[in-house]
Amino acid sequence: MSGDLDTGAEITWCTGCGNFGILAAVKKAVKKLEENGISREDIVISTGIGCHGKIFDYLDLSGIYSLHGREVASAEGIKLGNPDLKIIAFGGDGDCYGEGLAHLLFAAKRNIDITVIVHNNGAYALTTGQASPTSPKGFKGPATPGGSVEPPIEPLGLLLSAGASFVSRGYAGKVKHLSDLIVQAVEHPGFAHIDVLQPSVVFTDYYEEYNELVDELEDTRSTKFEAMELAQESDRLPIGVFYREERPTYNEELLGERNPVKDRLSDEKRLKEIRAFLDV
Amino acid sequence: MSGDLDTGAEITWCTGCGNFGILAAVKKAVKKLEENGISREDIVISTGIGCHGKIFDYLDLSGIYSLHGREVASAEGIKLGNPDLKIIAFGGDGDCYGEGLAHLLFAAKRNIDITVIVHNNGAYALTTGQASPTSPKGFKGPATPGGSVEPPIEPLGLLLSAGASFVSRGYAGKVKHLSDLIVQAVEHPGFAHIDVLQPSVVFTDYYEEYNELVDELEDTRSTKFEAMELAQESDRLPIGVFYREERPTYNEELLGERNPVKDRLSDEKRLKEIRAFLDV
Amino acid sequence: MGSKDDVKAMDEELFTVIIGGQAGQGVKKAGEALSKFFLEKGRYVFEMDDYQSLIRGGHNFASVSSSTEEIFSHHMRADVVVNLDKTSYEMHKKNLTPDGLNFYNSDEIENGEGIGLPLTSMSKEFQRPQLIMGVTGIAVLAAVVGENKDSLVSLVNSVYPRGKEDNTAFSKLVYDEVLDKVGSTLDLKEGDCRNRMFPGNHVIALGAASAGLDIYFAYPMTPASSILHFYASHGDKLGVTAVHPESEIAVANMAIGATIAGARSMVGTSGGGFALMAEAFSLAGMVESPVLFVLSSRPGPATGVPTYTEQGDLGFALHQGHGDFPRIVASPGDMEEAFYLTADMLSLLWKYQTPGIILTEKHLSESSMCMDVDPSKVRTVEPRMHEEDTEYKRYLSTEDGVSPLKFPPSKEAIKWNGEEHDEYGITTSRSEEVAAMHDKRHKKEEVILEELKDRHTVNVYGSGENVIFTYGSTTLSVREALRCSGIEAKVVQPIYLRPLPTWELKKHVEGRSIVVEQSVAQQFSTLLEDKIGLEPTSVIKRYDGRPFDPMDLAGKIKEAIR
Amino acid sequence: MGSKDDVKAMDEELFTVIIGGQAGQGVKKAGEALSKFFLEKGRYVFEMDDYQSLIRGGHNFASVSSSTEEIFSHHMRADVVVNLDKTSYEMHKKNLTPDGLNFYNSDEIENGEGIGLPLTSMSKEFQRPQLIMGVTGIAVLAAVVGENKDSLVSLVNSVYPRGKEDNTAFSKLVYDEVLDKVGSTLDLKEGDCRNRMFPGNHVIALGAASAGLDIYFAYPMTPASSILHFYASHGDKLGVTAVHPESEIAVANMAIGATIAGARSMVGTSGGGFALMAEAFSLAGMVESPVLFVLSSRPGPATGVPTYTEQGDLGFALHQGHGDFPRIVASPGDMEEAFYLTADMLSLLWKYQTPGIILTEKHLSESSMCMDVDPSKVRTVEPRMHEEDTEYKRYLSTEDGVSPLKFPPSKEAIKWNGEEHDEYGITTSRSEEVAAMHDKRHKKEEVILEELKDRHTVNVYGSGENVIFTYGSTTLSVREALRCSGIEAKVVQPIYLRPLPTWELKKHVEGRSIVVEQSVAQQFSTLLEDKIGLEPTSVIKRYDGRPFDPMDLAGKIKEAIR
Ligand SMILES: Cc1ncc(C[n+]2csc(CCOP(=O)(O)OP(=O)(O)O)c2C)c(N)n1
Ligand SMILES: Cc1ncc(C[n+]2csc(CCOP(=O)(O)OP(=O)(O)O)c2C)c(N)n1
Ligand code: SF4
Ligand code: SF4
Ligand SMILES: [Mg+2]
Ligand SMILES: [Mg+2]
C-alpha cells in the first residue's frame, strides 16, 4: 500500500466536490490510526454506488466496491468472517438512507463493530441529481421538476432510535475535524456512524450555508433524547459526536473468542465431529 | 360482502392466539367506520406473510395477500392508484419491522394516507418461532437455541423518528380498545401506525405479563420526544395513541385533486397530447 | 392421480405406515418414532412428512415406508394407517393396501371402517392430551407386528426424552388396546441395514461442513430453514457459525463479504428468498466470490404453497442474476449425493471463484432416508492462492481466467470490485478493459465445462430400451417406482444442470424416452429438448405440491411405455 | 475492432459529425444541436451519445450521422470531428473518413493533425467558458457546409434557450475562425425527411401513454432513468403520474398495488434494479397483475459499466421470477417499434393479466433517431371485466384461463392472493386446487402463444441467401451495416422473445446464418440453437459496452459470408 494511500486512479469527482474533503480526512485518519496501533493492513473498506462510492478507487486499502445500498451488509459479512479487521463502509444518502436503510438500522441495533460514513449531499448525484431521502421538500431534480413533495428524513434520530452506540456528524469542509471523528469512530468498540455534510457543487452547493451554520460541539450528549434534539437543530448545524455508549458488540456476542478464519477447525477435528454425527 | 365480514375460510390460528383479538377488533372497527360514513366497499387491505397474514383469508374485504415484508408497499400502490380508497396493511414483526422495515419508515416519512397494523408477537411464528426484530435478547428459538444475542428494536420510536403522524399501540387482549384505535387510525388523514401486542400462545405466551402491565393512555403526548419516552417504558405497557399530528399527505401533494383511475384522460385528450409531442 | 391398480408392488417386504392428525398432535415426531422402529429392525426406511403452513390444527401426516432392501421413497398405500382425527380418517382411509389395517379415533368417528381406538378419551387423563397422541403410531405398529412391550417402552423413551412418563404410559394403553382388538397379525422381517437416516437438509449441512464451511447465513424460509436450525444447534462443534440477519438481501451480501475475509460461506433459502438474492448473485459473479447458494424449492410462484414440493424454479435457478458470468448449478438425486455434491460444489466454487447453486426441493430437504457416507471421501480443493513474491492483482489475467486469492490483512490492497474493473480491481469503462474482463470471466466458464467433462456428471440407473429422464428429488420417486414395480427402464439423471452435461446425456437419446418432473410448464423436459434435442415420447408431471407416489408413478410409466 | 477498410460506405450522402469533450462541456447538447441542424435540412438523423458514469471530466462524445435516406445508426468514421479537449483529440483523430476534417483545441494541443482552433482562449471571455464550448460543434458544421450565419444564430437560439447571448456570440466567433481557416469545403444535400427525432426512452414513454398508462413507478437507474424524467416533466399533460419511491422493491410492489386499484402501471430499470424486482415479478404472475416492466440493459454483471450498452440480460429476462407462470417478453428493433410495441404490450398484459417485459438496451434507450408514428394506430384492448349480475370470483376458472377483473369499491370482496388460492382468492394447499390453479395460469400461456401466432412477431428485412439473426437495438446496427455496405442478406429479428415465435423463425433456418449480438456468452445465439436448432455459421459479438460501428460490422459480416 502506497504511503499516501493513493492508487493512482484518475479522480473523476467535480472540482470543488465535498468528496475531496472526505477522501483527505480518511487518509489523515488512517495515518493517525496507525500511530494508535491500528495497521492499514487491517482496515477493510466497502462502498456503495454513487459519486461517494468512487472513493473505493482512490483509497489504496483492501475492500469491496459493493452494490447500491449494500455496503453495510458487505461490511458486516467481512467483520463476521474475520472480526480482527476494522471495517469502514462508505455510503451515499440515496444509497445508505434509502435503498439500504434497513441494513444500516439493523447494524446499529445489533451493534456490530463497524464504522459507517455517509456522504450526505442531499441528492442522487451520480444519477444526475434526483431528490434523495435527505433532500428538503421542494427540491428540484429531474424526477421532481416541480419540487419534491416529501419532507426529508433525519438520519441521526433514526440511528439513535435504532440503538446506534456512536452517532456523529462531520462536515466535508472541515477535514481535520472529520478525520478526528473517523479515528474515534473506528476506535469505538461497536457500531459507529458518521453523517457527513457533503456539498455537491453541481446539485447541492451548500458550502456557504454550511460554512455559516456548522458548529463544532464541545461535548457529546448524555442521553439519546438530547442527542436527537441536537440533530434537529436547524438554526445551526452541530458537528461532532452526538452520542456514544459502550455495549456488547454483536460480533463478540455471536462469536465469543472465535475468529472464523483464524480459528478454523483442523480437518481432523472437523471430520471427527462429522463422523460423530453420522455414526452414533 | 357478508354482514359479519366472514369469508367462511377455516381459521387455522391456534386456539387462544392473539390474532383472534385483532380479527375481532378489525371487524368491529369496520362496522364503526361504516357508521361514520366509510363504506366497507372502500376499504382495501394488504397483508404480509406470517401467521398475521392469514387475516387476509378471514376478512371479507377486497385486497392483496402480498409478499413477506411488502404489504406496506402494496398498500401505497393501491392508494396511489385510487386515493379515495382507505387502505389497511397488516404486517408481522418479522415482516414489517424486519424484511420490510424500509417501506414502513418511508411510508411514515412521506405521510401517505394508509393505516398499518403490526401483529407484534415478538417471533417469526409461522416459520416455527425464530427470534424477530422485537424479540428480547436471550430469546430462544430454533435459530438461536442458546438465546438471541441481539437486543430488540423499539418500533414506535423508530416510527416517530421517521416522521409518522399517528403512532399508537394496542393490545390483542383488549378488543374494544384496539377497535377504537383502528377507527382513529383509518380516519386519521395521513400515515397511521398501530403496533399491536399480540401473544402467540405457542412461542410467546405473554398474556399474563401483558394483562398486568398494559395500561390505557388517557392523552396523546404533545411532542415526539414525550411519545418516545412513553414507548420506552417497561414497568408498564402504555396502549393508546402516543402521538398524532396533521400534515399534508403524500397522495394529496403528489396527485392534487386528481384520482388516477377516476380522472383518467379521455382517449381523445390523451391522443391530442401525444400528437402534440410527436408533431410539433 | 389415476391408474393405481395397474401395477402391483413387487417388493414383498415393503411395509408402510401412515399416521395423520392435526398440527400440534405430534405427527412429525410420530413419523420419527416409526422410522426409528424400522431402523432398529435393520430395515431401510424412507420418511416423508406432509404438513401445512400453520402451527396448530389443519392436517398433517407422515408416511414411513421400509423394506429389507434399499428404498427410495415413501408410499401412499400403507399396511397400517393411524388416524388421530376425523380429517385424517376421511383422507387416509383410501390409502390402504388390500390387507391394510386402518386405525381411527373412535371418539371422533362412529362406525368407521377399520379399528376404532378411543384416543381422545384415553388421552384425556394426561397433561398434554393433544401432544401425547402422536405416540399412538408407534404403539399401534409395535402391537400389530408383535413387538414386545419393553422394546416399545424403551423406544418411546429414546424418541420422547421430554415427558417420558406420560408418553410411555399412553403408549402402553394403546398397545394393550390394539392387541386386544386385532392382535399381532402382521409380519415384519428384520433386515441388515446398519445406516442412520437423516433429513436432506441435515445431509446438505453436513456435506458443506465436511468441505470446510465457516459461516452459514440464512433468513428462515421453508423448506430451507432446517439447515439454519441445524447449524444453530450443532455449528459450534462443526466450526460453522450460523447467522440470521434482517433479510435475504443482507444474507447474500454478508455471505459475499465473508468470502472477502477468507471465510467459506453458504446461504440457503427457497424461491422467494432466492429472488431477493438475484442482485447479490450477480455481484458474486462480478467480484468472483465463491458463495454457495442452496435453493430448496416449494410450489410457486410468489409465496405459493410454502410447505410442499415442486420443481418450478429450474429455469430461474439456471439464469439467476443479470449479466454474463459463469455459475455452476447442480441438483442431488438422493441423500448420499446431497452430501458429496454439496461438499464438492463448495470446493469447485472456491477453485473457480464464482457463485453456484445447489438446487433441491422440499421433498429431498425435509424427507429422511437411510444413507451411508464417508466424510473422509470428500475431496477438498485448496483455492489458488497468491504467491507472496509477486505484485498482487485481484483480477490478474491468467490462462484459465482464475486469479490467485489473497485475504486481509495484506500489505497490498486487495480490491474486489462490483463495477467493471481492470486487473487491479480499479473501476474502468475503457472498451478494451471491459472486453478483456468479460473474456477472463468467460474463460472460467469454458474451464469449468472442461473440468466437468472429466467428472461423473450423470447418474444412470438400470437399463432397458425405455429411458426415463429426471432430476433432483424426483429421481427418488422414479427409482422407487421402478424398484417396486419391476418395470425395466434406464433412469438418466443429470447431477449438474449448468453447465448441462450434454455430452453424457446425448448418449441416452434413443428409443422411447419419458421425462418425469414436477413442473406444470415442464421446464426440465424443455431444457432437454433445447439442449440435447430430446423429443420425449411422454412427459409425466405432477404439480399439486405432492411428491409422486411410486406406485402411481409406476402406473403412469407403464402407460407411457405401453 | 478490425477489418475497417474491407468495406466502403456506399451511401454517398452519409454525413457524420463526432464531437468529443469532457463531461460538463455540453457535449450531449452539442449532439442535439447537430441533429437539429441536419433535421432542418430534411435529412434523416441518428445520434448516439457516449458518456461515462461521472458528472464532470472524463471523456464524452456524440456521434451524429445523417443522410438523405433513412439511416439506422451512428457511424464511427466522421466527415467532421470536433475535439474540445486533448483526450478527445487522441481518441478521435482515428475516426475520420479519408477526406474528413479534424478540428481540435489548439490551446491544448500543439501542432495537431487537422485544424486547430484556440477554443480555450476564445471561450475565456465568457461567463461559463466550459459549458459554452459545446456550441463549437454546430458552429464548425455550419461553417464547413456553407450555412449562413443567421441560420446558425437562430438554431443556437432555439437549442440553447438559456444563455442565448453568450452562446450565439461564441458560435459566431468559431464560425468566423473556421471560415477563415478552411472555408466551406463540404457539400450537404437537403433531404425530404419531415420526421422528428426522439431518444428511445421517450418513445417508450409515449407508447405506454398512448395505451393508457396511469402511473409510472421507478427508482433512477441508467439507462432507464430518462423514462422517469420524461413522465416527471410531461406526465401531467399525458395523464401519467411519476412516482420515485425508496427502492426497486418498493417500485415493483407499488406497481402491483396500483393495478389492484385499476391503474395501468409500468416500471423501468436496468439489470441490477430488475434483479431486485424478481420476487415481485413472480408475485405479479401469481396474483395475475399486468405490470409492464421495462428493462434497459447495460453491461453487467452487478453494477457493470453503467452508461454503456450490452445484451447480457436476455436469459435473465426470459426466466425472471421463481415458479411457473406465463409472461411475455418483447424487444423492439427500432424506435417506431418501441412506440407501438410498448403500447401493444400494455394492452396484451391487461388482456391476459400477467406481467411482461420490454427488453431493450442503452443503445436504443438513449440514442435518438427520426421516426414517424401515428398514435391513433395504437390498438388498445379493454380488459375482460366482470359482469355485475354474477357472483364475483377473482380467479374464476374459464376456458382460456383469464378471469374477469373488478376493482374497488366493490360490494363483493376482490381477493388478489400471492399464496396459492382457490377461485375466490382464498388460500389453499389442497392438492386438487393447487393443480387446478397451475392449470388455469398455464392455460393463459397457451392462449398467449395462439394469439402471437396470429400476430406479426418477426421482422424480416432484405433478402438473400445469407441470413442474419439479431434482436433489439443490434438490429439497428445490422440494418445500417447492410444499407451502407450494399451487402445482400436477409435480416431476421424476433420482436417477441418469450414466447419465441419459433414457427416464424424456423422459416429462415436455411443456408448460411450469422448471429449478431452483444453478449460474451452469446445468449441470443444459444437461444436460437436451443429453440429452432440453428447452427450458425458464425456469431459476431461485441461486448465492450459499445454498440457496433456499422462499417466495422459490415466488414465482419463480409468476412463471415465469404
Ligand atoms: C439497485 C440499483 N439501483 C439504482 C442504481 C443507480 N444508481 C447509481 S448511483 C445512484 C444514486 C446515488 O445517490 P447517492 O447514494 O446519494 O450517492 P451520490 O451519487 O449522491 O454520492 C443510483 C440510484 C444502482 N446502481 N443500483
Ligand atoms: C422473502 C421471504 N422470506 C422468508 C419467508 C418465510 N417466512 C414466512 S412467514 C415468516 C416469518 C413471519 O414472522 P412475522 O412476520 O413476525 O409473522 P408471524 O408469523 O409472527 O405472525 C417468514 C420468514 C417468506 N415467505 N418470504
Ligand atoms: S456530481 Fe456532486 S457529488 Fe458528484 S462528484 Fe460532482 S460535485 Fe461531487
Ligand atoms: S403460532 Fe402463535 S401467532 Fe401463530 S397462530 Fe399459533 S399462537 Fe398465533
Ligand atoms: Mg447523495
Ligand atoms: Mg411475528
Image: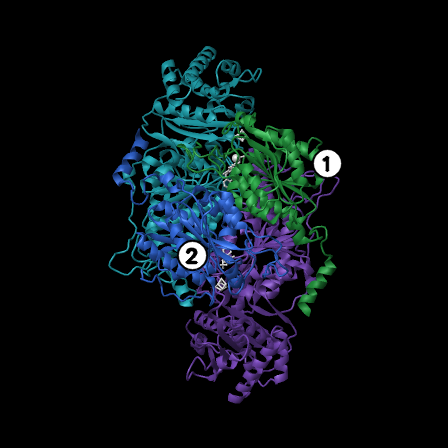
Chain colours: A blue, B green, C cyan, D purple
Residue type indicated by callout 2: Leu
Q: Chain of mark 2?
A: A
Q: Residue lying furthest front in this view? A: A218
- Answer yes or no: is residue C535 visible: no
Name, please, the residue furthest toward the top: C180
Q: Residues within 10 Å of mark 1 (few under 14, many from 20)?
A: few
Q: Which mark is residue D199?
A: none
Q: Position of residue A32 (x, y in %)?
A: 34, 56
Q: What SS does tag 2 mark? A: helix
Q: Is mark 2 within 8 Å of ligand 3?
A: no
Q: Would residue B224 be found to the left or right of residue C174 on screen?
A: right
Identify the amino acid type marked 1.
Answer: Glu
In the rendered view of the protein, which quadrant contains the C terminus of chain A? Answer: top left
Placement of C299 over or under D47, stated as above or below:
above
Task: Please indicate whether residue D337 sits to the left or right of residue A188 in the image.
Answer: right
Q: Nearer the viewer, residue D456 or D78?
A: D78
Residue reaching furthest to the left: C389
In the image, residue D345 sits, relative to residue C181, either above or below, namely below
D550, B142: nearer the viewer: B142
Same-chain status of marks 2 and 1: no
Q: Is residue C352 left or right of residue D159?
A: left
Identify the disc placed on residue B34: 1
For disc 1, the chain is: B
Residue C396 at x, y percent in the picture: 33, 60
- The residue that label 2 is drawn on is A178
Given residues D523 and D489, the one toward you in this image is D523
Q: Is residue D474 above or below residue D396?
A: below
Residue C528 or C557: which is nearer the viewer? C528
